[in-house]
Amino acid sequence: MNKLRFLISILVGKLVYAIGKPFGKSTNLPGIIMLKICPDALARFKMPEKTVCVTGTNGKTGTSNLLTHIIRSSGKTVLNNSKGSNMATGLVSALVTDSDFSGKIKSDVAVLEVDERSSQYIYTRFTPDIILCTNLFRDSIMRNGHSEFIFDKINDYLSKDTTLVLNGNDGISGLLGENKCKRAFFSVEKTDRSTSECEDTVCDLIACPKCHHKLNFEYYHYNHIGKPVCTECGFALPESAYTATDVDFENGTFKVKGINGENMSLPFPKGNFFNVFNITGAVAVCRLLGIDEKVIESSTQDLSSKTGRFEDNTFGGVEVVSMLSKNQNPISCSQSLKFLNSDDSEKDVVLLITDSNDSVHGAEDISWLYDTDFSPLKNDSIKNVYIGGTRCYDTAVCLEIKGIDTNKLKLFTDYSALSDELVKNCSEDRKVVVYFELYATRIVKMIKEKMASRGGKNQ
Amino acid sequence: MKTVIEILYPEFNNLFGDRGNAEYLKARLEKAGLETEIIETDLFSEPHFVSGKTDILLIGPCTEKSQITELEELKKYSDAIKNRIENGGVTLATGNAFELFGEYIENPNGEKTECLGFFPYYSKQFSRLRFNDNAVGDFDGMKITGFKNLLSFSYGENPFPFLKMEKGIGMNKETKNEGVHKNNFFATYHTGPILPLNPDFTDYLIKLCISDFNSEPLSFEKTAYDMRIKELLG
């Protein structure tokens, strides 16, 4: 009976996919409907020979895309959910497009990005061969509470048959599967830019996770990512199997050395140190899958940031840089803001970082702003800071407390008024840097359109 | 004389933006020309207020596991905390720090951790889903807005409620009574930077230690506060 329900759900899923595709409703809807027909559908697919799940707070999408790319370059076929959601419904939707009518997945390997809060509904249905956890940080309090809460959500559902690939610089996610799973660590060695003190606004790991005394760090890369060592009880993370060394920020290159004598030279997009972690984690997974060093090296040479999360164009003669800054995620936002330190050229900054649907969702909680490092806005090169949205006053309160000159601040509850004022006062001598949350893409588009119509060159 | 703000166990009690409270107090006091010091006390150190002068003591929320660790330490200073409450020391506990002052915390497996026992309520953790609430409550005619993010509710007697909720729940879904207010001790389930969200209450709190404090707020928090209250109360 259950088998029949599953087969029917596949038929329906494939049909919904075909009908929904032209309307952009094919990445989640088939899964929603299939799980209604067959609630344990995820457990009934015949998974490919190797299944890799990628989870964690930051870097899931980038790492999954990279993994897919490298594995494909090795000649294997890969199924992924890069176009859809990373919850059970999105996974089912991706699987049905790649399965035959009996539920057998055709690809050689599945690379699935998994929302860290969905572990319960995924790892209990099938056992991934490998789970890569990029890191764990504080993230949207509404959805995630705190990192320990998310840690438990993942840890409680891990199977002893899964191999974990973990960030050896992260004393939070690095404890996943302890005494339960086989674990392989990757890490990034101390770099020229490592610090001896945490220089970010928040650090999610101040006390030793074992003995609760103040934790020492040999160095920090950013936030709590570094090399934690407890002088009280001796706690440290295990040795890494894959280590990034010789990180060259000027040229955007580094090496990955492995326990089996691997030594690969790899590039990373300049200015995005996060990617060194993502790439090193992906390399570790690929080596566990038996992919040749040479394939890894050659397939990662042409990496550009293909994300669309960073754009730099000229509209009406004004250079407009737009960067995604995830709403409610202080780590993501702080990292994006560091871009403002990259040169001394004059800039106007536009902050569209609070919920752009606030009037629908209602009075967004703004706690996360206080965990965000806004200090780059103090630079003299920043001339104006336009703040948009219902919560612009709340944002301004936080900026004033953090010592940003209030004369720079221009507040607009109305996005249209903000863009008009920006276009009126902008100058070809000043870059405009727009920070936007995921749902504010339409506002960025409006700004760019208005900017383009002011006259001057577009490119 | 310097005004001293003490943050208890910031390495644990800073889940989301909680430091904003100390930073806002400092900004307001410094705007009024008052020298201000923030003292951070870590878990295994003796809190400053036990033998020194702490004008405002802040205790923020922590993870469910850390609560148990903290309680072990806090119990060593039980008398000092009790005296502080009885003698009118200005203290603000936010988020699940509210629970530390009740009878006990019960986890989903039914295991109980004894708390400081100053007030007769007790807390019960639920598993998995967290409870979020955007809220407004009344304190002596003053509207106070806040945000809850909880994995537990509190039950039982609460003879000294801090807020009467107008929007959102009290210490559990069945009551509109929220938090504790006794002398100059305030505890509330609301979490994060509740002081910059509530400039009038911040004034009130500062005046409890500096009676002639009279200083204009910063530039934007009054407008932000008015907008939020209007949106939440409709």
Image (cartoon, helix red, strand yellow):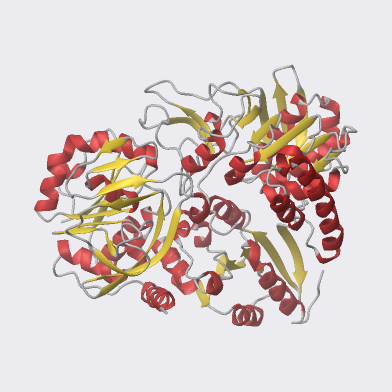
In depth, the one of B29 and A79 nearer the eye is: A79
Location of residue B232 in the rendering, given as x and y in whole percent from the top left corner: 42, 74
Q: Quadrant of the C terminus of chain B?
A: bottom left
Q: Is residue A205 left or right of residue B178?
A: right
Q: Is residue A236 left or right of residue A108?
A: left
Residue A287 in view (yes/no): yes
Residue furthest toward the front? A1
Location of residue B4 in the rendering, given as x and y in whole percent from the top left corner: 21, 52
- At a point 35% along the width and 30% down the height, the residue shown is A213
In depth, the one of B231 and A58 nearer the eye is: B231
Location of residue B86 in the rendering, given as x and y in whole percent from the top left corner: 10, 52
- At a point 57% along the width and 46% down the height, the residue shown is A117
Up the image or down, B32 lies above or below A196; here it is below
Could you say which quadrant of the image residue A76 lies in? top right
Location of residue A288 in the rendering, given as x and y in whole percent from the top left corner: 74, 25
In depth, the one of B55 and B155 nearer the eye is: B155
- At a point 70% along the width and 67% down the height, the residue shown is A320
In depth, the one of A15 and B87 nearer the eye is: A15
Q: Is residue A328 left or right of residue B188?
A: right
Residue A385 in view (yes/no): no
Q: Quadrant of the N terminus of chain B?
A: bottom left
Residue furthest toward the right? A75
What is the tally of numbered marks visible in this picture? 0
